[in-house]
Image: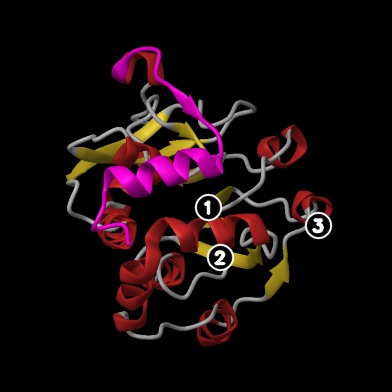
Amino acid sequence: MLNGIIICSDDRYFSNPLVKNFLSILETKDVAIRSIYVDKGFFSFQRIMKTVFIIGLRGLFKLRSIPTQSSLSDISKEHGIPLRVFDPAEIEKEKVDIIWVFNLGRILRKPVLQMPSKGCVNLHFGLLPHYRGIMPSFWAHYHGEPFLGITYYKMDEGIDTGPVICQTQIPICSKMNLVDIYQKGFDQAACMIEEVFTCLSGDLLLKQEEAAGPGSYFMMPTWRDIILYKIKFFPYSI
């Protein structure tokens, strides 16, 4: 049996339902989760303010229409898994086979990355190597992409540069609010979990350059970027 841990944010709208779905699937696998580490710094004041401004009133009303999901505390209790605050020093002591990462706002350093024998698996909303970096869903929409990439990959010391496990694309359009895109993205990510296990068991990994060329990298959008986005996608961004 493989032992693993999960590192994620506590997001009742998107990542928590994915984690709950993931744990349900693990019940049919020879994998056990030893701990869940929550990144309490993911929702920084800057990220919250910028996200609220990006999605606007339309997005806030869409969020209100999403049924309230379980907190990470409830999910961990339901599955009998300890919930801990993200701490690299504590994670290094776990000595597990694999780390699963969903919605982490930090860079994992070499000691953590090298600890699990099977590596660290991360979910990224970009068709890597394209749209590496922060808020890839925003940047794909900002640039008018007709599709959003969903990628599971093995983490290395670079930012979103590790070998691809599996990836796919979902259609997006200018009439969508970023909340719509997040919902579609996390729904698709849940549908890919079985494929992730298949690819990992067969060691079917692909170097990113082989997948789609040199790629691109983006940072947190500036307020100027966000204002231009709001103008570009009016009235769907109000």
Measured in 3D between alpha carbons, the distance from the residue under mark 2 to the one under mark 3, in whole angstroms, is: 15 Å
Q: Which of the two discs, 1 and 3, labels the residue nearer the N terminus? A: 3
* Amino acid type at image mark 2: Ile
Q: What residue is at 38 percent from the left and 29 percent from the top?
A: 128
Residue bearing the label numbered 3: 90
Taking 162 as reference, is 91 above or below it?
below
Q: What residue is at 69 percent from the left and 60 percent from the top?
A: 41
Foreground disc of the pair 1, 2: 1
Residue bearing the label numbered 2: 33
Q: Which of the two discs, 2 and 3, labels the residue nearer the N terminus? A: 2
**How many tags in the picture?**
3
Q: Are marks 1 and 2 in contact (CB under 8 Å)?
A: yes
Q: Quadrant of residue 159?
A: top right
Measured in 3D between alpha carbons, the distance from the residue under mark 1 to the one under mark 2, in whole angstroms, is: 9 Å
Q: Which region of the structure is painted magenta?
A: 212-238
Residue bearing the label numbered 1: 100
- Residue 232 in the image: state x and y as whole percent: 29, 42
Taking 125 as reference, is 28 above or below it?
below
Measured in 3D between alpha carbons, the distance from the residue under mark 1 to the one under mark 3, in whole angstroms, is: 16 Å
- Residue 58 in the image: state x and y as whole percent: 31, 69
